[in-house]
Amino acid sequence: MIIRLGRNIATQNLVPGQAVYGEDLIKRKGVEYRVWEPRRSKVGATLVKGMKFPLRENHLVLYLGVASGTTASHLSDMLTKGMLFGVDFAPRVLRDFVLLAETRSNLIPVFDTANKPEHYRWVVPQVDFIVQDVAQPNQAQILIKNARMFLKKNGHAFVAVKSRSIDVTAKPGDVFKQFKQEVKASGEFEILEDIRLEPFERDHMALLLRKK
Ligand SMILES: C[S@@+](CC[C@H](N)C(=O)[O-])C[C@H]1O[C@@H](n2cnc3c(N)ncnc32)[C@H](O)[C@@H]1O
């Protein structure tokens, strides 16, 4: 469950007493919430900016680029009857995510590259939601491959795009336009929303997509 606290948002803590990345814990009517820091999480930034995020408590989620689980920890709070499969290829950050998953039974770590979804086909089921935050030049193709393999029809994808990771020299607006064209050309998605993440992240865009 998400609540709004003035300009902030917070999720009901699935593991009371646990702070994951130094965020504040607050109590309202005897219930503990974790403040979702928009400068530490691109999903958090888009929520503060008012973008829709149609995640339900029973969803199955594939998270590409889960890192140590800062954002995934808030999704874990929300997925009280669901499950999140978190993929990352960097051992140092994934080790922290494994430790987090030991405290939260709805998190499953997958140590692999998101470029090769066929590697984790045996562990990841058909999902309702994909979250992608990999900051890679070929991230549109990574998204499309994973969506073709795992995302249910009418399922949603949240994508964070960092302009400089795709092309350091091009104007961010041009990179974002090109990214959207690539996603549309795949024929897989309808683009529901796109927003820039300033002031929380410079030269980033977030997209909400629905699989056709
Ligand atoms: C910006 S960080 C993600 C932060 C995280 N989404 C959060 O909000 O808590 C990007 C992550 O993507 C991972 N990554 C980049 N390319 C990848 C790939 N091809 N396969 C798996 N992980 C990848 C990196 O190792 C890094 O941990």
Image (cartoon, helix red, strand yellow):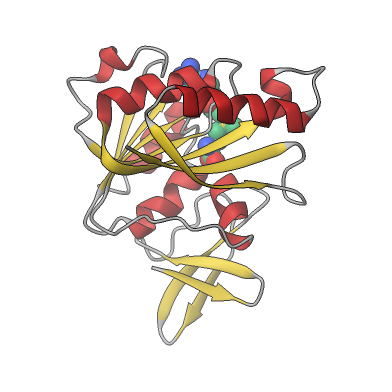
> Which residue is rendered at x = 64% and y = 24% of the image?
178
In the rendered image, which quarter is residue 31 located in?
A: bottom left
Q: Quadrant of the C terminus?
A: top left
Q: Is residue 83 above or below residue 9?
A: above
Residue 141, image x, y percentages: 47, 17
Q: Nearer the viewer, residue 170 or 43?
A: 170
Residue 181, image x, y percentages: 57, 26
> Which residue is rendered at x = 74% and y = 27% of the image?
174
Q: Nearer the viewer, residue 210 or 17?
A: 210
Residue 39, image x, y percentages: 68, 50
Q: Quadrant of the N terminus?
A: bottom left
115 left or right, relative to 38: left
Q: Nearer the viewer, residue 13 or 50?
A: 50
Q: Is residue 149 above or below residue 20?
A: above
> Which residue is rendered at x = 42% and y = 14% of the image?
115
In the rendered image, which quarter is residue 15 located in?
A: bottom left
> Which residue is rendered at x = 77% and y = 40% of the image?
202
143 left or right, relative to 124: right
Q: Is residue 63 visible?
A: yes
Residue 19, image x, y percentages: 50, 57
